[in-house]
Image: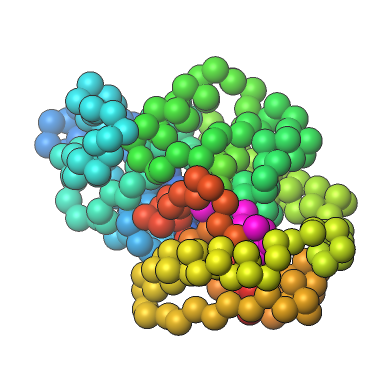
């Protein structure tokens, strides 16, 4: 199999299981040395899932192919986080060959990490850790030093540089939990990368099963000591326009707010997930009794939409 064929097969296996990533979420890459038909010279090329598309059904046309030396050359022209948007356009100047998909905002993370194969996924089990208030400590308890924590940063070139530095500084690490976002794992071969990705996801599932509680917040009315009703409604009034705007990216939506005791008790129980899932922008945990925490931030992946539990 060619590097492209091997990558597509891995994407189909990993992306075909909803436990591993959401539909159209995440991306994967493979680096290989191939002969440039125009020059006859050996060229380092990276194949990576482009913008849009779904890992489980990805085809060759959904991959972007880039000359790695040109992508690495962008380090010298990068002007810092304030200029992230201009970097996506520069990826077009790094394309190798004809056709393929447009490179995504995650391209730098795949290209700059010093591993031949990289998976970036959005598993529910990892997102549970990534969006937890004590996410760094939970990640350490679950994985030790094998999987590291990376504070939230908008996906882009700086995140790629951060990931490069982390990978180089921790040669024994097999991946990292991206705060508020998801999982990135890597390997020297496609099989090793896939095995590591799946192992991390299953370990997170087992950790949650062993340490979770059916009513993680206890009795919210007694233990939470929530804000007074008037204060909750004031907080909700300030929050709803932001949530409505984020949730209406794909189609217009109308929000509804309720803070009855039965609802507060329900969302603190293990029964809530049985009533469906929705795709929302969830930049960080949002306790229902506190409203929008200070410093809430937009997610990544062009909004970083992840599966999250529907509240009502």
Q: Quadrant of residue 234?
A: bottom right
- x and y percentages locating residue 245 in the rendered image: 39, 68
Is residue 48 among the parts visible in the rendering?
yes
Q: Quadrant of residue 94?
A: top left
Question: Would you say residue 287 sits in the magenta stretch?
Answer: yes
Residue at figure coordinates x 60%, y 60% from the top left: 291
**Where in the figure is residue 218, as x and y percent of width and height?**
86, 61
User: Seen in the image, is 169 located left or right of residue 43?
Assistant: right
Q: Is residue 208 inside the magenta stretch?
A: no
Relative vertical location of residue 306 with respect to residue 208 in this rendering, above or below: below
Relative horizontal placement of residue 297, taking residue 227 as reference (left or right)? left
Residue shown at 43% from the left, 64% from the top: 242
- Residue 35 percent across, percent down from the top left: 24, 34
User: Which residue is nearer to you in this view: 232 or 97?
Assistant: 232
- Residue drawn at the location 19% of the way across and 45% of the way down: 89
The overriding secondary structure of the stretch rendered in magenta is loop
The single residue placed furthest to the top in the displayed view is 169
Question: Is residue 273 among what the camera can see?
Answer: no
Kindly give the residue lying farthest to the left in the view shown: 38
Give left or right: position of 205 versus 197.
right
Q: How far across and how far down the image is residue 312, in percent?
A: 63, 79
Task: Identify the colour scheme used.
Answer: rainbow
Identify the magenta region. 283-290
């Amino acid at each position: 199999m060619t590097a492209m064929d091997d990558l597509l097969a891995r994407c189909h296996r990993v992306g075909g299981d909803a436990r591993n990533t959401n539909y159209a979420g995440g991306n994967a890459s493979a680096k290989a040395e191939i002969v440039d038909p125009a020059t006859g010279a050996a060229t380092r090329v990276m194949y990576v899932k482009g913008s849009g598309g779904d890992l489980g059904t990805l085809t060759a046309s959904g991959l972007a192919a880039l000359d790695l030396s040109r992508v690495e050359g962008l380090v010298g022209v990068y002007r810092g986080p304030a200029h992230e948007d201009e970097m996506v356009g520069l990826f077009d100047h790094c394309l190798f060959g004809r056709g393929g998909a447009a490179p995504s905002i995650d391209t730098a993370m795949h290209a700059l990490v010093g591993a031949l194969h990289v998976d970036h996924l959005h598993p529910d089990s990892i997102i549970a850790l990534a969006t937890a208030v004590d996410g760094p400590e939970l990640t350490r308890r679950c994985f030790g030093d094998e999987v590291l924590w990376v504070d939230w940063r908008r996906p882009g070139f700086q995140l790629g540089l951060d990931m490069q530095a982390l990978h180089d500084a921790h040669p024994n690490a097999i991946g990292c939990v991206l705060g508020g976002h998801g999982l990135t794992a890597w390997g020297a071969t496609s099989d090793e990368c896939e095995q590591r990705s799946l192992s991390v996801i299953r370990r997170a599932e087992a950790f949650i099963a062993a340490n979770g509680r059916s009513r993680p917040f206890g009795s919210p009315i007694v233990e939470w000591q929530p804000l007074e009703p008037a204060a909750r409604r004031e907080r909700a009034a300030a929050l709803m326009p932001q949530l409505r705007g984020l949730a209406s990216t794909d189609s217009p939506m109308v929000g509804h707010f309720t803070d009855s005791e039965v609802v507060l008790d329900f969302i603190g129980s293990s029964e809530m997930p049985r009533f469906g899932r929705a795709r929302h922008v969830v930049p960080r945990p949002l306790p229902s009794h506190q409203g929008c925490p200070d410093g809430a931030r937009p997610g990544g992946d062009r909004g970083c939409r992840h599966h999250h539990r529907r509240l009502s």
